[in-house]
Image (cartoon, rainbow, N blue to C red):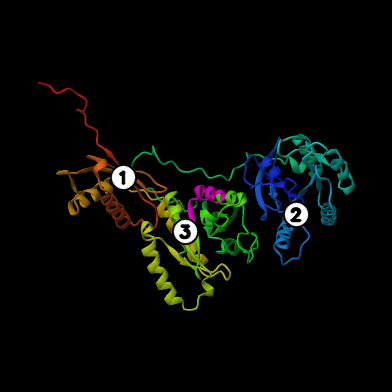
Amino acid sequence: MSFTVAIVGRPNVGKSTLFNRLVGKKLALVDDTPGVTRDRRPGDAKLVDLRFRIIDTAGLEEAAPDTLQGRMRMQTETAIDEADLTLFVVDAKTGLTPVDQNLAELLRKRGKPVVLVANKSEARGSDGGFYDAFTLGLGDPVPISAEHGQGMLDLRDAIVEAVGEDVAFPDADDEAVTDVVLPRLAEGEEESDEEPAYDETKPLRVAIVGRPNAGKSTLINRFLGEDRLLTGPEAGITRDSISVEWDWRGRTIKMFDTAGMRRKAKVTEKLEKLSVADGLRAIRFAETVVIVFDSTIPFEKQDLQIVDLVLREGRAAVLAFNKWDMIEDRQAVLADLREKTERLLPQARGIRAITISGQTGDGLDRLMQAVIDTDKVWNKRISTARLNRWLEQQQIQHPPPAVSGRRLKLKYMTQVKSRPPAFMISCTRPDALPESYTRFLINGLRNDFQMPGVPIRVHFRASENPFEGRKKKM
């Protein structure tokens, strides 16, 4: 992107609505409640013929540095320092407030280009607030409606004038490169006896999920080596699913921080429902999911439900027992964690579990190596020849049960997709095959082909009878 723009303003003036309008997607949470946005969220914006990077920020408020509002203000000031241009959004409907005056003074001290944006100008009675914006001394305000898309052409012209045409339209010899990673082909791929090699250079999408106050944002900040995400002792600080990129041993990692997930019965507020839904979208978009446990109170019912949710979505999962620096008798606790992992998570037998400390950075390399190893298994493909030799051996050792006096027969097996591994078995009377034998086959695949900790799908279909439907000849 040619330049960076930060959207700032007091709470509830429509910053996130404008952000969503410019990126063309509903990425940021929007609600009538003031102070929804807390972290700074980056995105790729498109405004007519302009392409630039945009940052959504929290509403600026006067607060002490050690408070939550004070830490949110520091995040916003960091975004202003990073940006080449600031969009200062005011509410034309309600008019100016003393907070707007203080923010205008703050932006003047920064000495960077500012475009004054009068949002909600479509509302009745907004003319007074629009003309009051001239008193801020930041140039002519641009009247827009972020919700309805009005005034976008005027905003485009104001941005070009503020940054200059040489910055707004840099000479580029090649097309813009998108950072969206397309999924690999699954169904319809040509079958081969050779198993494809794992691509060590492919960017990896990782989502961090868990209960509130488990240390997810602190963990990502430790990976990045900076206070990129808002953290603190308060539970439920994170609301939006924020994505950050960094390199680990030469490989690009795109990591998603998500809001803490409480029990569904306790989630009553609309804003928290939106946050949880945003986290679920991050899980579906990710390839590997790190479920963060609090080592001091592990294996709560909600922890198990989150793991089950991730596996049902077909994602590769890794357990991270955080706050390990607070554990005293580590050997006894470690043995207890291993026993409970095997007993309480039978559907994820062999799942990788790492003890870490987001506060001190202990165990982070082991966690990332576990993520890479799990992703390799999640992408694994097995040749049809090996699968059918394995299926024949399984039927010799443990034949399928007889149903109504007739023995079931498994004839042919192939892998239809990876991510997660899924297999199709052609057999007689697939509806009569008991669930227990399906679990036996899944456990056998997991053990014999080294696929621990990832969901495995096995589907059955009846083999085609070429004589079916023909009349019996006399």
Q: Residues within 10 Å of mark 3 (few under 14, many from 20)?
A: many
Reply above or below: 152 against 268: above
Counting from the top left corner in percent of width and height, residue 75 is at 70, 58
Q: Answer left or right for 369 relative to 104.
A: left
Instruction: Give the Cα distance between marks 3 and 2.
Output: 34 Å
Counting from the top left corner in percent of width and height, residue 54 is at 69, 47
Q: Residues within 10 Å of mark 1 (few under 14, many from 20)?
A: few
At mark 3, the secondary structure is helix
- The residue at 77%/40% (across/down) is 120
Reply above or below: 345 against 404: below
Between 267 and 42, the one nearer to me in the picture: 267
Question: Tag on residue 56?
Answer: none
> What residue range appears in magenta?
277-290
Question: Tag on residue 80?
Answer: 2
**Disc 3 vs disc 1: which is toward the camera?**
3
Q: Is residue 251 visible?
A: no
Q: Residues within 10 Å of mark 2 (few under 14, many from 20)?
A: many
At mark 1, the secondary structure is loop
Q: Which residue is mark 1?
A: 193
Question: Which residue type does callout 2 highlight?
Answer: Ile
Q: Tell me whether the residue at label 3 lies in contact with that at label 1, contact meaning CB atoms closer than 8 angstroms.
A: no
Question: Which residue type does callout 1 highlight?
Answer: Asp
Counting from the top left corner in percent of width and height, residue 249 is at 53, 60
Q: Which residue is mark 3?
A: 371
Q: Tell me whether the residue at label 3 lies in contact with that at label 2, contact meaning CB atoms closer than 8 angstroms.
A: no
Marked residue nearer the N-terminal end (3 or 2): 2
